[in-house]
Amino acid sequence: MRPLLLLPLLPLLYCVSGQRQLIHPDAQACANRVKHTTRLFNGRNYFFSWEHEPTRNHKRDWLDARNICRKHCQDLVSLETQEEANMIYDAIRARNVSYIWTSGRKCNFDGCDRPDLQPPIVNGWFWSGSSARIPATNSNFGWRGDWSDRGATAGQPQPDNREFQESGTDEACIAVLNNFYGDGIKWHDVACHHVKPWVCEDTNELLNFARSQNPGIPIP
């Protein structure tokens, strides 16, 4: 069963970082994206930044990484099933990548005061790439993901919003960390300003938008 959608909040994501906004796709970049595809899974192209020569050693903050994906009619990866997550974990393991960004996001901005999203650290997580809700972190409903059972604070499972407690910076984005705390390949909530490699996946919404706006450019 796929998670419920968070569609009423989608427009708000365009202004969550002050003046920095999400970009529209570039039709030619969308057409060329298949040249840089490193995986094809369930009919969708996936891009791994560390397997593409120009971005092999690049790291970006969450919004920059997301905009790189969006330029190519993709978005940061949304790990909505264990099968998809395992495919990503295998790629991380094969190159011993330390960590990556996903599209996972905590609803902590204007419009997130809905009762069903409270408290946000438990009920406010969603995949910004697809607008799908992530089941509550204390729930057994659906696939709640691979949250780590530990972090920098001993005995504290993820998400723990540790940086907010230390510096007031909200840990509002989901990264996959590779055994960073001796916990295997697991999800951690991380402040969105940190820089990391990233994974993109095709997004039908952006592909359809680019095709409709650029009928003269063949976008596979």
Image (cartoon, grey):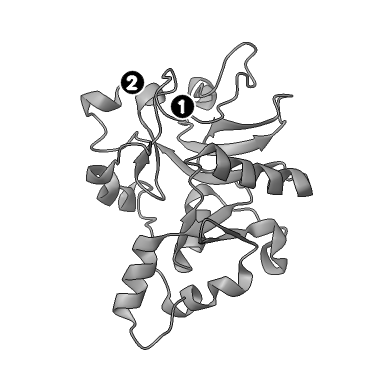
Vertical position of residue 71 compared to residue 196: above or below: below
Vertical position of residue 84 compared to residue 153: above or below: below
Residues at marks 1 and 2, CA–CA distance in whole angstroms: 17 Å
Q: Which numbered disc, 1 or 2, marks the residue closer to the eye?
A: 2
Vertical position of residue 205 compared to residue 59: above or below: below
Q: Which residue is mark 1?
A: 168
Vertical position of residue 157 compared to residue 194: above or below: above
Q: Find numbered disc 2 in the image and state the secondary structure of the residue it sits on.
A: loop
* Mark 2, other Cα within 10 Å: few <14 / some 14–19 / many ≥20: some
Q: Residue at x 51, y 31 (%)?
A: 145
Q: Residue at x 65, y 63 (%)?
A: 38
**Where is residue 142 drawn, in percent x and y?**
42, 29
Residue 24 in view (yes/no):
no
**Where is residue 49 drawn, in percent x and y?**
64, 58
Q: Find numbered disc 1 in the image and state the secondary structure of the residue it sits on.
A: loop
Labels 1 and 2: the sequence-earlier one: 2
- Whether the residues at callouts 1 and 2 have beta carbons within 8 Å, the answer is no
Question: What residue occupies the far top of the structure in this picture?
Answer: 155
Position of 112 compared to 202: left or right? Answer: left
**Where is residue 129 drawn, in percent x and y?**
41, 50
Looking at the image, which is closer to me, 169 or 161?
161
User: Quadrant of residue 122 in the image?
Assistant: top left
Q: Residue at x 41, y 19 (%)?
A: 139
The quarter of the rendered structure image containing the N terminus is top left
Q: Amino acid at mark 1?
A: Gly
Residue 128 in view (yes/no):
yes
Q: Which residue is mark 2?
A: 119
Looking at the image, which is closer to me, 136 or 81?
81
Looking at the image, which is closer to me, 108 or 4?
4
Q: Amino acid at mark 2?
A: Pro
* Mark 1, other Cα within 10 Å: few <14 / some 14–19 / many ≥20: few
